[in-house]
Structures are given as structure tokens and as C-alpha cells.
Image: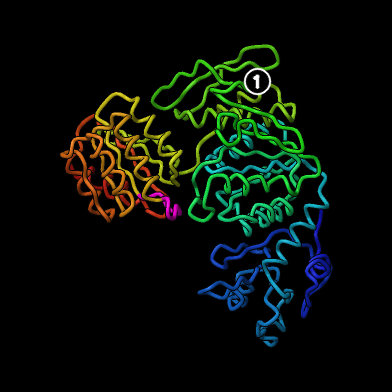
Amino acid sequence: MNIYLKDLVTVSEGILIKGNKDTLINSFSIDTRTLKEGEVYLGLKGSVVDGNTFYKEAILKGALGCILDKNTSVDLEFLQDKDVFILLVDDVISSLHQIASFKRSKLNIPVVAITGSVGKTSTKDMVASILSTKYKVLKTEGNLNNHLGLPLMIMKYQDEDIMVLEMGMNNLGEISTLSHIAKPTLSVITNIGTSHIGNLGSRENILKAKLEILEGMTEKVLIINNDNDLLHNLKIDGKIITYGINNKSEYNAYDIKYNLDNLTYKINLLGSTYEIKLNVPIESFVLNSLCAICVGMYYNIEVSKIKEGLENFKLSHNRMEIEKINNITFIKDYYNASVDSMVSTLSYLGNLKGRKIAVLGNMLELGEYSKSLHKMVGNVVYEKGIDILITVGSDAKYMADEALKLGFNKNNIFTYIHNREASLKLLSILEDGDLVLLKASHGMNFAEIYSLVKEGLKNI
């Protein structure tokens, strides 16, 4: 399905000051640093940088054309000998939404939309891995799941059979916008946790925000994690498909067995019992995979192909990556962090044999709930029998305070503000056979800790 410049002009109600209306449009870019030849450049005006001012750079890098704010001062002399287009619009972001929505409306294909407090990206990747055994799939790249990333992904569509789109949010109303653009045919809510509770004020408001995923659907079909307290017994004006471990659901996992770097469980499908293997040893990924199985069954994927898709699934970079250096096992899980994911990874660490060291950093965007939620993690550190706790950040210190209050050995707790200090302490206490968990929100840059420690171990 092709989109032409004339469609952009019509949909955006913009003013074309240069260009051929029959120009074929394939994809957009919002960053001249990563722009590829033939992409359309969107000039976004931020609080610090005005992207409209980089239109010349975009053209010199091979942009097919530019969509710019109508107030942009355009150098017509510079454009004179350039085979490009310039489209001026009232609002570039609104135009992006309108164009992506227009393209989606022309596509008669299934769209799976995935949201939730945690597990969105992993579930999206599992779903795509299963669907890819039968269909050509377009899926959200990385975490391009917001008001810019989602429409940019839709504009990348070429000839795929199905789309799998992740939807993230910080506030009420944001997923509603994404749902109206994507018009899902099947939606998923992985769970309702505490991510962004600082903005939304309560888990009930988080649920309200996540349920906006239904607003763009013509026929509402929703897959939910039935073990989540706020999703259990959820009622909607449409069909609900459930999965879980503890609560009786349409798709249940049982007989779960954990190993260092994988797990297995059993599930009943189509009247038969099957064993599923995952190359990720965390219980939350059992739930994510159950969700993916729901999607696979909904789209009539053979069970053998579902198993194949899950066995081929690999986590994104810095999500539960296990590496060994000098017989010390590092568990790198610092792509992001929430209370739920902290609990999952600490539970996993607690079940392993060996001296257990947890290096934990701030969980961000928790607002007034930050102190209580960090203390909750400290409680889990104590309960799971972690041997040594190192915290990084002013809020993470509450984890240490709570663990200490509960009886954690004060000689085995270390609190720091900066990554480098924590790295030096970790290096000084490491012993042969140690198990080290590195877990924090992405903004804490825990990759720096791993890099410093890895370099230090080379010199030992």
C-alpha cells in the first residue's frame, strides 16, 4: 500500500512550497544523526532544540523531503537545485499522527497492541517471534512506543502480514491517542504495576490509562494477565482472554522448573499437554510467554510453531543478560526497573546457589511513592536471602535502610550516590563463584558499572 506526497498534503492540510506530489513516501526520521537516505525528515520543536533548523542538514544527508513547522524560515536559494520537497504544516507532531492514522486506515491487516506496567517489550518480542513462524511481521523496534515512535513504526510498513505494536505512556490520554492511530484488532495488557504512579497517582488510574488501548478498536478483544490483582475479574464491553499461573485461566502454566539460564513449564493446549522451554529463568517471563501463546492460538499458529517461536526468543540488550567473568556470574538487567521487575529478579537471584550480591539503583518516575516503593524492594532483598547489598542513588538508599531495619547484616550493606564508587566497592569484595545482579532504571546508566568492573577484573 503506497503513500504519496499528495496524500501528506491532503491529510496534514499543509502548504507544499516545493516538490512533486507524486513522490512515493516510505518512512520518516526525526533525527538527522540517524536519518537514512530516502527518508522524510520531520522537524520537531523541543524545549531546548528546534529540529526545524536542521532541515538543510537532513537534505544534504539524502532526505527525500522535509515536513516543517509553518513558521520555519526556508532558504529557497539553497533548495533551488535540490530534488526534494518541503511541506509546511501547523503542527508537525499532529501531522505525523494524521499521516500514520491515514496509512493504517488503508491497511486490512491484523494489529496486535501491547501495553502494561512491565513486560511490554519482552512480550512484544515473544509475540512477534511466534507470529513470525507463519507471517511476515512488523514489530516495534526497541522501545519506540510513544506518540512519536508508534506512528513512525506504522509508516515503516511495506508488505507485512501483521503488526505488533508496543504502547507506552506517562499520563492519562496518551494510550488513547496511540490506539486511535493504530486501530488494534487484538489488544494485550500484561499487568498493572507502579510504573509512572508518580504521574498518575494510583494503580487504579494506571489501569484506567492502560484500558485506553481499547478505544481505537472496532471489535474489542483483550488478552489479560489473570494473576494481576487489578486485571483479575476485569469486565469490558467485549471479549477477554485470560492467562496465568496462580488463578484459573484459559491458558495456565504449571510444573515450572527453573535453571540458571532457562526454565521449563507445562501447558494444556487443544486437549494435549506440552512442555515449553524459555531461555530466560524468571517467573515473569512465564507470564509473558503465556500471553504470547494466547496471541499465537488466536491467530491459529500450530503448537509446534508456538514452541519454536518461544525457544528462538532472545531478550533485548541489557535485559537479563547472564555473563561470566573469572568464574563470577553477572546478571545484567538494567534496561529498566520497577517494583515488579525488582521482585522478579531478586527472587531469581535468591534461588541460586552461591554468594548473592545485589547492586540496585534508583527506580525512576515514582513521585511521592518513591520512598515507600524503594523500601518495599529492601524488604524483598531481606526476604530472599541476598548476602550483600550495594545501592546507588538517593532513593535506592531506602532499600538499604529497610533491609537493615529488618535485620540485614550491617557489614554487608553499602550505599553510594555515584556509579564509580559502587564499582570500586564491588571490585574490592568480589570472590570466586559470586553471583552479581545489576538492576536499576535505564537512566541510572548501570552499563557504566558493568564496564568498570569488567575492566577491573581483567587486571586481576
Q: Position of residue 89 (x, y in %)?
A: 73, 75
Question: From what the image shows, is residue 13 above or below residue 387?
Answer: below
Q: Amino acid at mark 1?
A: Ser
Q: Quadrant of residue 53?
A: bottom right
Please state if 284 lies on the left or on the right of 431 as rendered. right
**Residue 292 seen:** yes
Q: Residue at 72% across / 84% down in the picture?
A: 80
Whether the magenta-drawn stretch holds residue 443 is answered as no
**Element class at badge 1:** helix
Question: From what the image shows, is residue 56 above or below residue 224?
Answer: below
Name the main secondary structure of what is drawn in magenta: loop
- Which residue ends up furthest to the bottom in the rendered image? 77
Residue nearer the viewer, 418 or 61: 418
Please state if 428 lies on the left or on the right of 333 as rendered. left
Give the crowd class for mark 1: few <14, some 14-19, many >=20 residues within 10 Å.
few
**Image coloring type:** rainbow
Q: Quadrant of residue 220?
A: top right
Q: Residue at 46% across / 38% down in the picture?
A: 340
Which residues are the magenta region?
362-369
Please state if 132 lies on the left or on the right of 5 as rendered. left
Q: Residue at 26% across / 44% down in the picture?
A: 401
Q: Quadrant of residue 418?
A: bottom left
Residue nearer the viewer, 302 or 101: 101
- Which residue ends up furthest to the top in the rendered image? 272
Which residue is tagged 1?
A: 304
Residue nearer the viewer, 231 or 26: 231
Q: Position of residue 286 (x, y in %)?
A: 53, 27
**Residue 327 seen:** no
